[in-house]
Image (spheres, rainbow, N blue to C red):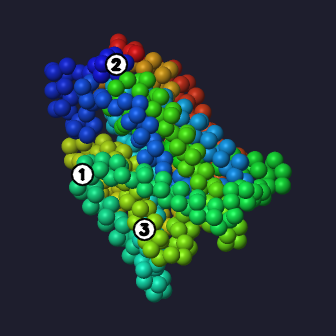
Amino acid sequence: MNPTSTDTAGSFPGALAAETIRASSLYNKDLAPVSPERRTWRTYNYAALWISMSVNIPTYMLASGMIAGGMNWKQALFTVFLGNVLVLIPMLLNAHAGAQYGIPFPVFARASFGVLGANVPAILRALVACGWFGIQTWIGGEAINAMLVALIPSWGRFAYGPALCFTAFWLLNVLVILRGIETIRFLQGISAPFLLLIGLALLLWARSKAGGFGPMLATPSKFQNFSEFFRFFIPSLTGVVGFWATVSLNIPDFTRYARSQRDQMIGQALGLPATMTFYSFIGIAVTSATLIIFGQALWDPVAVLSRLGNPFAVVIAMLALLIATLNVNVAANVVSPANDFSNLSPRRISFRTGGLITCLVGIAMQPWKLMANYGSYIFGWLVGYSGFLGPIAGVLICDYFLVRKKNLALQDLYLRGGQYEYSRGFNWQAITALAAGAAIAFIGLAVPLLRVLYNYAWFVGFAVSFLAYLALMKVNQPQPVAQATD
């Protein structure tokens, strides 16, 4: 298909309109719509993107945490697969606008939240990415610390060793950000194979130590009945959905480069569920094996790798893990929040500045507490932030598909005083709907009898905000925009 076809081209502004957009205070080159000739990503690119983003240590730990919590391997694998199929739905729905109009997530959010109100969902999403940045940096610091202990055993007795290693890896991330996007692209090309090799090596090592796949996967579920399993299953499923709830919002940042809607949809459908399920199986199998090998479920792969026994093997494994973690961290957790922070003041905050803000906030969120145990990680972090991101997805999808019928006025997304100005730049219907969804989701934390609402945080927040926004906008229905659609 020709990249300029209406399947993705939407209504790209002409020369005069483009000049008007560029003169706006809401514009910078990082937020600009992608021209049709630059929309060259095909099915393979999107499948490869998801392979590179899914093969990471938090994916492993998401699945291994379920084993540590009491699931058997079949229950954990089913939970991971189902959660990724479910999150693929809002992923593809939000991806449509990026491919159709060539716009990133913060600009897409202006249609529903207003040209200034879009900063609310953008910053909420950015803060979650900052937390992920901190988590990945903490994992990288742990890898450096384990490598030093293997080389210099006395390092393990140094009380400030983990903190120094965390700081060193944080500075390495900052250096990559300052060097720019080309360094990120280089790292992305070499990282996923490293993590795949680490995962496969761990799997083979665990198989050998545990006496084969039979004993590894024979560990029974700790749950005595379906009721016990279900109480653990629901927040775990919400955690899986929450794992990619961030990217399900900012997926237009990537699909704005799509050659066609078909390319991005098929690429994502092929890449996300399959890769997440495969790499999760490695985490599930290895963690199950650690019950046999060590007598306890080690859900942290760094802890498992550090017990390989051979210092040379530990160093090689940790170096590979460092390179891969560095790439995933910058590509998945810096690019999007950098754009989100840039949206606050496009003329003053560049991509690099936004990236540095991400690094600083990532430390402030204290990732060592988020990763203290599998309960903090899955039920505190993943489920918790999904209560904010589900409502945002509900508003975005309702507005784009039901209220606007996929028609956006591209020029007005970059201008003050246009149809997305609402009330001084804010659409209070959208913000009210977001607040209602989040409030209902989080009421379960305050009222024990309603804990189920928190366990379903993403789903509850999505449904409440979707319906609330639809009802509120019926009172103030925007005029339809005449635009080309696919």
- Callout 2: 10 Å neighbours few (<14), some, many (20+)? few
C-alpha span from label 1 to label 3: 27 Å
> Residue at 37% across / 18% down in the picture?
7
Looking at numbered disc 2 in the image, what kind of residue is underneath it?
Answer: Met
| Disc 1 crowd, CA 10 A, few/some/many (<14, 14-19, 20+) | few
Q: Which mark is residue 451?
A: none
Q: Nearer the viewer, residue 66 or 482?
A: 66
The residue drawn where x is 43% and y is 52% is: 193
**Residue indicated by mark 3:** 316
- The percent position of residue 31, horizontal first and vertical second, equals 28, 37
**Disc nearer the start of the sequence (1/3):** 1
Residue drawn 50% across and 20% down?
A: 402
Sequence-wise first label, 2 or 3: 2
Decide which of 482, 449 is in the foreground and name it.
Answer: 482
In this figure, which residue is indicated by the disc labeled 2? 1
Q: Is residue 48 above or below residue 316?
A: above
Q: Kindly report the distance in space between the C-alpha atoms of the residues bearing marks 1 and 2.
A: 32 Å
- The one nearer the camera, 272 or 175, is 272
Whether residue 110 is visible, yes or no, is no
Q: Is residue 308 left or right of residue 477?
A: right
Q: Nearer the viewer, residue 161 or 417?
A: 161
